[in-house]
Image (tube, rainbow, N blue to C red):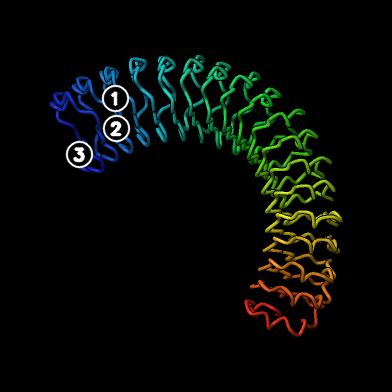
Amino acid sequence: MILSNCEALKELHKDIGKLSKLNELNLAFCTSLKALPNSMFRLKELKHLDLSGCITLGCLPKSIVNLSNLETFRLSMCRKLEILPAKFKKLQSLVELDLSSCSGLGRLPNSIVYLSKLKTFRWTECFKLEKLPEDFGNLQSLVKLDLSYCSKLKWLPDSIVNLSQLKTFRLTQCPKLEKLPVEFRKLQSLVELNLFECSELGYVPDSIVDLSNLQTLNLYKCLKLQNLPTKFGKLHSLVELELSNCYELRSLPKSIGDLSQLKKFGLCNCLKLENLPKKFGKLQSLVELDLSFCSKLGCLPNSIVGLSNLQTLDLYGCLELKNLPTEFGKLQSLVELDLSFCSKLGCLPDLIVELSQLKTFKLHGCSKLENLPKQFGKLKSLEKLDLIGCSELRYLPISIVDLPKLKAFQSVGCGKLKKLPAKLKKLSKLDCSFFFD
């Protein structure tokens, strides 16, 4: 039965309990519904109950726990709901429970830990939540747990490491969370761990390196994080690592080069990061690397040219970067290179012209760059070239007219660049509207 979006519906008739064969009841966004009849416990065949968006619903009847076949129970955005029935554990068939945005709900009944079949539990934006039941780890079937935006959550019970089937664990924007359980290694099924903007988290436990199935780790804006475990490279299944805006991160462990499956690595705005490990080039699967705004990064290790699958390299705003490795042209898969506002970069290595797949090249604001390599025209795939604000650039190599795919060329603010090669404007695909001021 679908009654969703019946905004004028204030109550259900008590005879609804006579619908003994009812399998689904959808009351989502019945915004005037204030209560449910006790007769609902007679709906023995009910498997799916959706009360999402019932913003005036203040309580649930105690009898609701007698829905013995209920598998899906959605209560998201029931903002006036302050308590769940004490005997919630009687919902033994429950597989999915959604309490997202139940902002009035401050705690769970302890009996919830006995929902032996529960696989998905969402309790996001519950601003009163400070802790979970001590025995939360009894939920042995749990696969997905989302506690994002629980702004008062300070700690996790040690028992949480007993969730042996857990694959997805999200703690996005839990700013009071200071630490994770020491024995985190026990979460052996974990594939995704999201700690986005857990700003009080000062470290991750060493045991995290034993999560052999972990593929995604998000530590974005963990403001107090200074380092990673020494043996971090043991995370051999890791595909995506996000460390952007970790302002206190000073270095990466040497073992990070052992992350053989890593494809995406975010280090944007790591203001205290001064260098990368020498064996960084061992990250053979890396496709995307973001080092933008790493304002203290003075150089790249020579081994970086070994990143044979790298397609995107962002070095925007690396103010201390003075040069690139001589053999930079070995990055044969590189499609996009951003060196904008690398204000100390005085020249480019000659072999950069060997980047045969490069389509986008940004040098915006490279105020010390005086010239481009003579054989620049060998970049046959180049479509976009940004030289805006290269105030010391004096001339362009004649070979630039050999860029057959060049579509966008910008050189506004190149005050010392007096003329362009005569044939440049004849390139058939080139938009000529951004040459000079």
Residue, disc 1: 60
Quadrant of the snapshot with the N terminus? top left
The correct choice, above or below, for 223 with respect to 419 in the image is above
Which residue is pictured at 61% across the width and 19% down the height? 186
Position of residue 223 measured from the top left corner of the image (x, y, whole percent): 68, 38
- The numbered mark at residue 346 is none
Amino acid type of disc 2?
A: Leu
The correct choice, above or below, for 386 with respect to 317 in the image is below
Instruction: Determine contact: label 1, label 2, CB under 8 Å.
Output: yes
Q: Nearer the viewer, residue 72 or 188?
A: 188
How far, Cα to Cα, is label 2 from label 3?
Answer: 12 Å
Mark 1: which secondary structure? loop
Which residue is pictured at 40% across the width and 19% down the height? 117
Residue ranking furthest to the bottom? 422
Around disc 3, counting alpha carbons within 10 Å, would you say few (fewer than 14), some (14 to 19), or many (20 or more)?
some
Number of numbered labels in the structure image? 3
Apparent side of residue 407 relative to residue 367 in the rendered image (left or right): left
Quadrant of res 75: top left
Mark with earlier residue (2, 3): 3
Amino acid type of disc 1?
A: Leu
How far, Cα to Cα, is label 3 from label 1?
Answer: 17 Å
Residue, disc 3: 9
- The numbered mark at residue 57 is 2
Position of residue 56 measured from the top left corner of the image (x, y, whole percent): 29, 35
Position of residue 78 measured from the top left corner of the image (x, y, whole percent): 35, 34
Quadrant of the snapshot with the C terminus? bottom right
